[in-house]
C-alpha cells in the first residue's frame, strides 16, 4: 500500500477519470469565458483591421487641422452689416454683435483634396475585402477552430475577391446614404412628417446593422449570390431576435462606455482614452456580432440542411443546396 502511494507521487496515475468535455453552448456565460481566452488574438486581429478606420481618421485630421479661412456663423451677418454701414440703429447694432461670431473653416488646397480623396478611395475599394478577412478570423475564434490570423485573413480575401469588392462598394453606399439621411432628418425632426422619417431611418439603421452581423459570415461560408445573402440576412433579423438584440445592445454598451471615458478626458486634455479604443474596439465589436450571429447560421443553414432528408426535397432544390459549400 505504501509503495502504491509513492508511485502516485512520482508517476502519473492511469486510473483517473477523463475530464468532462467543456460545455460550449453559446450562452452569455460562455461568451465571457471565450472572450477572456481569445482576447490576445482579438488584439492582434485588431491591428490587422486598422486599415478599416486609420485612413478615414487621417483624412479627418487633414481636413480639420490644416489651413483655414475665417467666416461668419450666421447668414444674417451680411445684411445687418449693410444696415449698420448705412446708418444703422441701436437694435441693428445689437443684432450685428449677436450674429457676428466668426468661425475658422478648413481651406482645401489641391494637395489636401488629392490626399483626402486617395485615403477615402483606398478605404472604399478595400472595405469589403477587409471585412471578409476579419470575419473569417472572427468566425474561427467563435467556433473554437485553430486560427492563423495573417494567412487566414488573406486566404478569405482571395476566395471572395470579386464578391468582396462588389458588396464592399454596396455596403459603403448603403452606410453613407443611411447616415446622411439620419443627420438630415434629425435636423428637421421638429416637423411631424420629418420626425416620422427620422424614426423610420433609425429603424433602417438598426435593421441593416444587424443584417451586417450575418452578411459577411454567409459570404465566406456559402456559395450564394449577393441578392440571396441580403435576403437571408434580412430573414435572420427577426429569426434570431434574442441573440441579435443582445449582440446589438452589447456593441452599443461597449461603444457607450468608451465614449463616456473619452468625453471627460478631452475636457482635461488627457488623450489616452481617445487612442486606446483603436487597439481593441473594432475587433471586440466584431467578436460580439460574430458570437450573436454564428449560432443562428449554424442552426438554420447548416444543421437544418445536414438533418434534412434529401428524398423529401425536389431534385432541383437538393442540387441547388448542395452547391452551397461550407469551409468546415
Image (spheres, grey):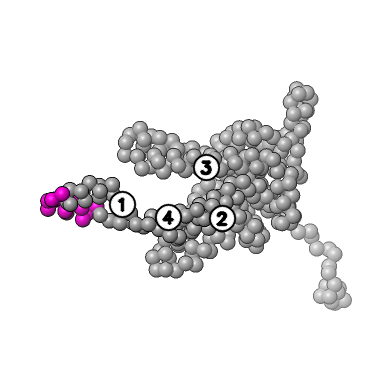
Front label number (1 vs 4): 4
Q: Position of residue 96 (x, y in %)?
A: 20, 53
Label 4 secondary element: loop
Q: Which residue is mark 3?
A: 175
Q: Which residues are magenta?
A: 86-99
Q: Quadrant of residue 98?
A: bottom left
Q: Quadrant of residue 323?
A: top right
Q: CA distance from mark 2 to mark 3?
A: 17 Å
- How busy is the neighbourhood of tag 1: few (under 14 within 10 Å), some, or many (20 plus)? some
Q: Position of residue 306 (x, y in %)?
A: 75, 36
Q: Which residue is mark 4?
A: 107
Q: Position of residue 191 (x, y in %)?
A: 32, 36
Label 1 secondary element: loop
Front label number (4 vs 3): 4
Q: Which circle's residue, 2 or 3, is located before the other in the chain?
A: 2
Q: CA distance from mark 3 to mark 1?
A: 29 Å
Query: Vertical placement of 237 versus 289: above or below?
Result: above
Front label number (2 vs 4): 4
Front label number (2 vs 3): 2
Label 3 secondary element: helix
Magenta stretch containing residue 288, yes or no? no
Instruction: Report if the CB atoms under discs 2 and 4 are less than 8 Å apart.
Output: no
**Horizontal relation, residue 243 to residue 66: left or right:** right
Q: Which mark is residue 55?
A: 2
Magenta stretch: helix, strand or loop mostly: helix
Query: Vertical placement of 157 versus 263: above or below?
Result: above
Q: CA distance from mark 4 to mark 3?
A: 27 Å
Q: Position of residue 124 (x, y in %)?
A: 58, 46
Q: CA distance from mark 2 to mark 1?
A: 30 Å
Q: Which circle's residue, 2 or 1, is located before the other in the chain?
A: 2
Amino acid at each position: 500500500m505504501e509503495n502504491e502511494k509513492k508511485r502516485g507521487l512520482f508517476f502519473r496515475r492511469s486510473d483517473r477519470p477523463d475530464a468532462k468535455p467543456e460545455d460550449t453552448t453559446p450562452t452569455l456565460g460562455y461568451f465571457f469565458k471565450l472572450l477572456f481566452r481569445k482576447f490576445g488574438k482579438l488584439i492582434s486581429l485588431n491591428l490587422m483591421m486598422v486599415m478599416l478606420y486609420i485612413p478615414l481618421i487621417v483624412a479627418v485630421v487633414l481636413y480639420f487641422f490644416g489651413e483655414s479661412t475665417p467666416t461668419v456663423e450666421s447668414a444674417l451677418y451680411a445684411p445687418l452689416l449693410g444696415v449698420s454701414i448705412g446708418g444703422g440703429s441701436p437694435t441693428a447694432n445689437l443684432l450685428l454683435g449677436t450674429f457676428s461670431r466668426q468661425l475658422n473653416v478648413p481651406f482645401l488646397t489641391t494637395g489636401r483634396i488629392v490626399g483626402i480623396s486617395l485615403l477615402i478611395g483606398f478605404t472604399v475599394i478595400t472595405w469589403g475585402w477587409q471585412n471578409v478577412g476579419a470575419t473569417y478570423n472572427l468566425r474561427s475564434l467563435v467556433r473554437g477552430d485553430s486560427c492563423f490570423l495573417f494567412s487566414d485573413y488573406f486566404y478569405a480575401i482571395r476566395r471572395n475577391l470579386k464578391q468582396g469588392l462588389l458588396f464592399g462598394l454596396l455596403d459603403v453606399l448603403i452606410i453613407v446614404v443611411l447616415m446622411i439621411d439620419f443627420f438630415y432628418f434629425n435636423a428637421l425632426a421638429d416637423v411631424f412628417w420629418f420626425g416620422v422619417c427620422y424614426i423610420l431611418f433609425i429603424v433602417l439603421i438598426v435593421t441593416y446593422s444587424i443584417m451586417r452581423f450575418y452578411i459577411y459570415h454567409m459570404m465566406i461560408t456559402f456559395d450564394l449570390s449577393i441578392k440571396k445573402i441580403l435576403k437571408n440576412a434580412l430573414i435572420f433579423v427577426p429569426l434570431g431576435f434574442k441573440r441579435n438584440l443582445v449582440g446589438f445592445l452589447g456593441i452599443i454598451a461597449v461603444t457607450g462606455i468608451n465614449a463616456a471615458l473619452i468625453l471627460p478626458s478631452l475636457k482635461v486634455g488627457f488623450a489616452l482614452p481617445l487612442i486606446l479604443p483603436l487597439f481593441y474596439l473594432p475587433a471586440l465589436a466584431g467578436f460580439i456580432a460574430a458570437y450573436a450571429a454564428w449560432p443562428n447560421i449554424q442552426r438554420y443553414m447548416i444543421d437544418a440542411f445536414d438533418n434534412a432528408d434529401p428524398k423529401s426535397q425536389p431534385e432541383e432544390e437538393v442540387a441547388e443546396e448542395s452547391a452551397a459549400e461550407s469551409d468546415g
